[in-house]
Image (tube, grey):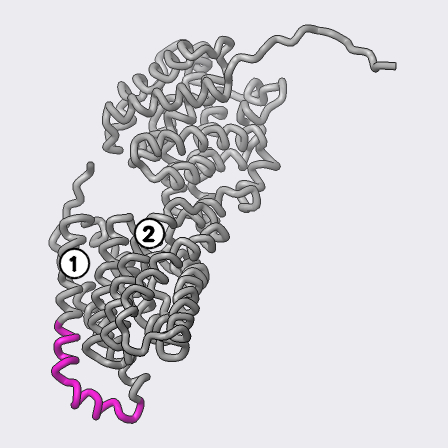
Amino acid sequence: MMVTKLNKKDVIKSISAFIIGALGLVAIVFLMIVINEKSNTWAFVTAKKNELVITAVAIIVLSVILYCYFLFENKTIFKRVSKMIEIFLLLYTSVMLVFVIGKYVDSAARPLSFLALMAAMLLRNRDAIFLNTIFALLLLLIDRFTSITGLNMYDANASLLCTFCTGIVAIFVLRKVKTRIGSVLVALALLAPVEGINFILHLSYEHWNATYALNLLMYGALDSILSIMLFMVILPLFEFIFAELTVFRLRELTSDDAKIIKKLKTNAPGTYNHSVVVAQIVETCAKEIGENSELARAAAFYHDVGKLKNPEMFAENQSEYNLHAELTPELSVDIIRSHARDGAKLIKKSRLPEIFADVAVQHHGTLPIKYFYVKALKMSDGELNINNYSYSGPTPQSKIAAMIMIADASEAATRSLSDRSPANVESLVRSLIEERLDLGQFDDCNITMRELSIIKSTIVNQLTGVYHSRVVYPKLTVSKKK
């Protein structure tokens, strides 16, 4: 696994961001006091100054703990100021939503799972769980020390357990959901822990009766419903503001309704079909080596969009006549080579994710375009510089780009095989990987030999499934029954 190293600038930047973030949380609590107490704010602060100091110090301590967690578990967070801002903005939003709904609806209806649902989409599982734990403790501090939420001991304890338990359930259940509409069903999964915890912890409450129990059940259900509804409304805002590539966003970008995909399907059907197969292969490869399979799949859909500029100049979109027969090898190379850069430009112009542009320009690396190099050699008397007949690069900078490079070449080469037996496909894919290793195409992407072996086996299995041999049907004309 690649180790993230922080320089002095990163450390100063991250510490500053967390100090400001912690002070922001303290300010949010003060704002809640102002909203709750209005003209009595100063009297409230004076009367509760000790508790409020404890709350402020505890918030700072929780922020320090959060910083230490990322320092030891996920330093990459500190490389992006926007990510640190996003984390604290999520905490601010969650605290305010819980406060407002608790004040104007009911304390039992507070959307305690909202932060966990958002974190599950925006962070890794482990990071999401830890952030949800910090949020649960933060709510307990506010409930027990500030008194602005008006919760008794039973409600505060139930809130702590509900936030933690439903958060864990939300994080793991939401990972299996692939569509925004499907996430609505997560509310059902959240009902059980919410209702169970509320019911059990309030059994010994002195005001317990049938009406109180019914209210708990009703507002507990509202808690789950509001969490999901707010999640669905606010997540797109975070996706837009922070350019987040959630599974929902990635699925939308690869649907047939996506602008460039629709154009690819209409104007370059051969390239579209090739991209669909490559995306399927890469998604499976990514799962096998522990990469982000949804991101890999989406990047594969866009890796060849540069061919939209001259779709008829690429073999998969041609009929029987090859337009390159009329061109010099040098001109053909320029056209073929330019699709990598053209794809990156189109992706950036369309304001699509940066990684799509990176993959588009990297998926051929600095490989030679051998067909036209050989053609040029035959037309030349002397030596030719192979670099003039090669892609401009750079070589793959990520494992996703490397997987797409291999899958792209393997799919195209397999289609040209007359005998697509598993042994032949395996030999072909192995030779393609070895060639790219020899040419140093994987030197900058931190991919291991073990991962390349897994990728090879996965691609062979996928391609032999897609291009399996077919039964030769007898020629027979059947007349209509009388």
Q: CA distance from mark 1 to mark 2?
A: 21 Å
* Closer-to-camera residue (350/152): 152
Up-down relation of residue 150 to residue 254 (above or below): below
Tag 1, which secondary structure? helix
Q: Is residue 380 visible?
A: no
- Residue, disc 2: 171
Task: Find out whether residue 42 is within the magenta segment.
Answer: yes
Give residue 294's position: percent from left, percent from top. Answer: 40, 40
Q: Is residue 290 left or right of residue 323?
A: left
Up-down relation of residue 369 to residue 77 (above or below): above
Which mark lies nearer to you, 1 or 2? 2
Amino acid identity at mark 2: Ile
Residue lying at 36% horizontally and 79% vertically, measured from the top left: 103
Residue lying at 54% horizontally and 37% vertically, measured from the top left: 309
Q: Which residues are magenta?
A: 38-57
Give residue 408's position: percent from left, percent from top. Answer: 43, 26
- Residue, disc 1: 67
Give residue 358's position: percent from left, percent from top. Answer: 36, 40
Residue 441, label in figure: none
Up-down relation of residue 321 to residue 357 (above or below): above
Which quarter of the figure has residue 323?
A: top right
